[in-house]
């Protein structure tokens, strides 16, 4: 997900997106632990996307 796409969303939408990403992160960690994860780079992508969403959400909340 690109930064421009994240910035276009409201705080509520960002919260929903964050919850979805955290669930995906949990599933990826579970797959990695059981040795079933094929695309290991996805773990890094999801972690960074979570950080982007949190950053932009906090910026929006600080603005008003």
Image (tube, rainbow, N blue to C red):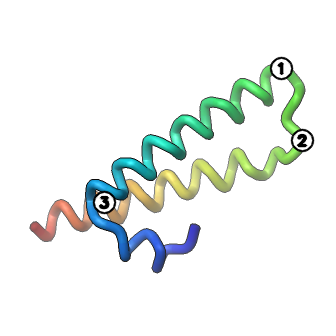
* Residue at the limit of the structure toward the bottom, as seen here: 4
Q: Residue at x 10, y 67 (%)?
A: 64
Q: Residue at x 88, y 29 (%)?
A: 36
Q: Is residue 3 above or below residue 56?
A: below
Q: Which mark is residue 38?
A: 2
Is 55 left, or right, of 59 in this rendering? Answer: right
**Marks 1/3: CA–CA distance:** 33 Å
Secondary structure of the residue carrying tag 3 is helix
**Marks 2/3: CA–CA distance:** 31 Å
Residue 62 placed where, x, y %? 15, 63
- Say which label, 2 or 3, has the lower sequence index: 2
Q: Residues within 10 Å of mark 2 (few under 14, many from 20)?
A: few
Is 49 left, or right, of 18 in this rendering? Answer: right
Q: Quadrant of residue 43?
A: top right
Q: Is residue 44 above or below residue 7?
A: above
Secondary structure of the residue carrying tag 2 is loop
Q: Which mark is residue 56?
A: none
Q: How many marks?
A: 3
* Residue at the limit of the structure toward the top, as seen here: 34
- Say which label, 1 or 3, has the lower sequence index: 1
Is 52 left, or right, of 37 in this rendering? Answer: left
Instruction: Please name the residue that numbered disc 1 is placed on.
Output: 34
Asked whether the beta carbons under mark 1 and mark 3 sit within 8 Å of each other, the answer is: no
Position of the N terminus, as image quadrant, is bottom right
Q: Residues within 10 Å of mark 1 (few under 14, many from 20)?
A: few
Is 3 left, or right, of 27 in this rendering? Answer: left
Depth check: give the residue in front, 57 or 12: 12
Depth check: give the residue in front, 62 or 25: 25
**Marks 2/1: CA–CA distance:** 11 Å
Q: Which mark is residue 57?
A: 3
Residue 28 placed where, x, y %? 71, 35
Q: Residue at x 43, y 69 (%)?
A: 6
């Amino acid at each position: 997900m690109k930064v421009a796409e994240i910035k276009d969303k409201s705080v509520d939408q960002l919260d929903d997106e964050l919850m979805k990403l955290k669930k995906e992160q949990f599933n990826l960690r579970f797959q990695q632990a059981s040795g079933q994860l094929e695309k290991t780079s996805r773990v890094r992508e999801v972690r960074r996307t979570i950080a982007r969403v949190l950053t932009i959400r906090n910026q929006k909340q600080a603005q008003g």
